[in-house]
Image: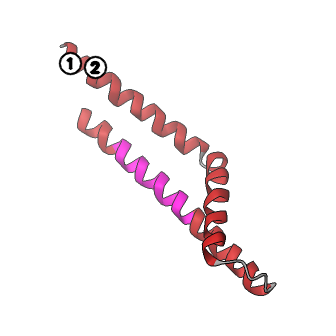
Amino acid sequence: MTRIARSKLVRLMVYYTAARLALIAGLAVIVMGINAVFDLEIPGALSLFGALLLGFAISAIAFRSLRRRINDEVMVVDERRRASRTA
C-alpha cells in the first residue's frame, strides 16, 4: 500500500515539475520574441532569468491545486511511514 502512495506522489511531482518547466520555457519564448520584435537588445541570459522569476510566480498561482494534492500525498506517505514504524 505504501508503494502505491509513493508512486502516486512521484507521478504528481513529475507532473508538477513538467508543468513548471513548460511554463518557464513558454515564457522564455515569449520574452525573447518580444525582445526580437521590438529590438530591445536585452541579453538572452537576462530574458531567461526574467522568465524564470515570472514563471515561479505564475506557477504558484496557476498550479495551486496540484501543489495541494502533492502536499496531501506527502501527508499520507508520512502517516503510513509513522504507522509502520510503531507497528
Q: Quadrant of the N terminus?
A: top left
Position of residue 74 measured from the top left corner of the image (x, y, whole percent): 40, 33
Which amino acid, mark 1? Arg
Q: Which residues are magenta?
A: 8-22
Q: Are marks 1 and 2 in contact (CB under 8 Å)?
A: yes
Position of residue 80 measured from the top left corner of the image (x, y, whole percent): 29, 24
| Outermost top residue | 86
Identify whether 59 is placed above or below 87.
Answer: below
Question: Would you identify the image quadrant in which residue 55 lies?
Answer: bottom right
Distance in Å between CA atoms under marks 1 and 2: 5 Å
- The reply to whether residue 1 is in sight is no
Which residue is the site of mark 1? Answer: 85
Q: Which mark is residue 82?
A: 2
Type of secondary structure dominating the magenta stretch: helix
Q: Which mark is residue 53?
A: none
Q: Residues within 10 Å of mark 2 (few under 14, many from 20)?
A: few
